[in-house]
Amino acid sequence: MDTTNSEEDGNDSVTGGYGKDDLIGGQGHDSLSGGHGDDSLSGGHGDDTLSGGYGQDRLSGGDGQDNLSGGYGHDHLSGGDEADTLTGGNGHDHLYGDIGNDSLIGGNGHDHLYGDIGNDSLIGGDGEDHLYGGNGEDSLVGGYKKDYLIGGDGNDYLNGNHGDDYLTGGEGADTFVIQKHHRGKDTIIDFTDDTDIIMLKGLSLDDVRIGSRSLEGNVVIEIKGGYSVTLLDLDDSTVINAEDFTVSR
């Protein structure tokens, strides 16, 4: 393994080669690129740009507002403090926003995204993804396959997008999105009447048919075009009606 430390101060640019590289940034705004091989990149202080390249890489932003890109391979990305941008790329990646209002994009592959602390934006991309908002008011958007969205604490926005998705808002007043041209059969695990809301994007109440409550407490909402959403385990006193919906373009 080759280990490279950038200068104590200054904005440095370091590129690894073939093989396993260990690149460590310093105090400035550094640019680290792993190249080929299973690399380890650590930004340190400053607003850094880290690119894993080919291989199964581990990227850690550290302090500052960092931009991390995994590239090809099954990568592990950790933002650190402040507002970071993490992009998994190709492969089955794990992205951790840590502290700050972070932006996480899974890319291709079956990815796991963790917003952690802060008001985070999580986008799954292609593949069967798991999105965890954590603490804060988070936005979670799935992709084209079966995704699992868990908002966590805070008032979260959950949009499964295409595919048969499972959505859990967690604590707080959450917004679950039903969007025009979506395809699939979604399931909302923990809809709470008088607290959570269902947003119709590009749709109207005339496009919605609310089914009767089953013995198990489930209600199926059918959408014009063949899309449906099932609300699981509703309380006996819960009645789903127009007041549970809001309309948005």
Image (tube, rainbow, N blue to C red):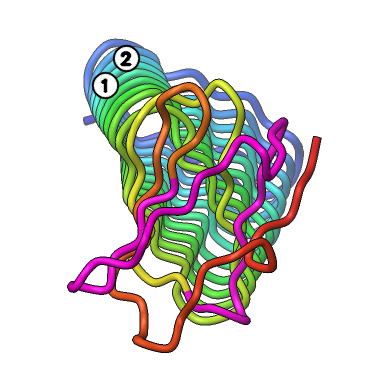
The secondary structure type at the circle numbered 1 is loop
Kindly indicate the quadrant of the structure image that contains residue 172.
Answer: bottom right
Give the vertical position of 94 relative to 163 (above or below). below
Residue at the image point whose x is 54% and y is 39% from the top: 86
In percent of width and height, residue 82 lies at 69, 61
Q: Name the mark on residue 73.
A: 1
The residue tagged 2 is 54
* Front-most of residues 66 and 113: 113
Task: Let me know if residue 216 is in the magenta part.
Answer: yes
In the displayed structure, 158 sits above or below 231; it is: above
Classify 181 as above or below 142. Answer: above
Q: Amino acid at mark 1?
A: Gly
Q: How many residues crowd around disc 2 within 10 Å: few (fewer than 14), some, or many (20 or more)?
A: many
Q: Is residue 167 left or right of residue 217?
A: right
Q: Is residue 2 visible?
A: no
Q: Quadrant of residue 249 in the image?
A: top right
Sooner in the amino-acid sequence: mark 2 or mark 1: 2
| Magenta-highlighted residues | 192-221
Q: Is residue 12 magenta?
A: no
In this image, 48 relative to 192: left or right? Answer: right
- Where residue 77 sits, quadrant-wise, is top left
Foreground tag (2 vs 1): 1
Q: Position of residue 42 (x, y in %)?
A: 47, 46
Label tally? 2
- Residue at image location 33% in from the left, 42% down from the top: 165
**Farthest-out residue, front:** 212
* Left or right side of 167 for 50: right
Question: Which percent across, then down, holds residue 159?
Answer: 53, 44
Image location (x, y in percent) of residue 10: 76, 40
Is residue 66 or residue 120 the one in the foreground?
120
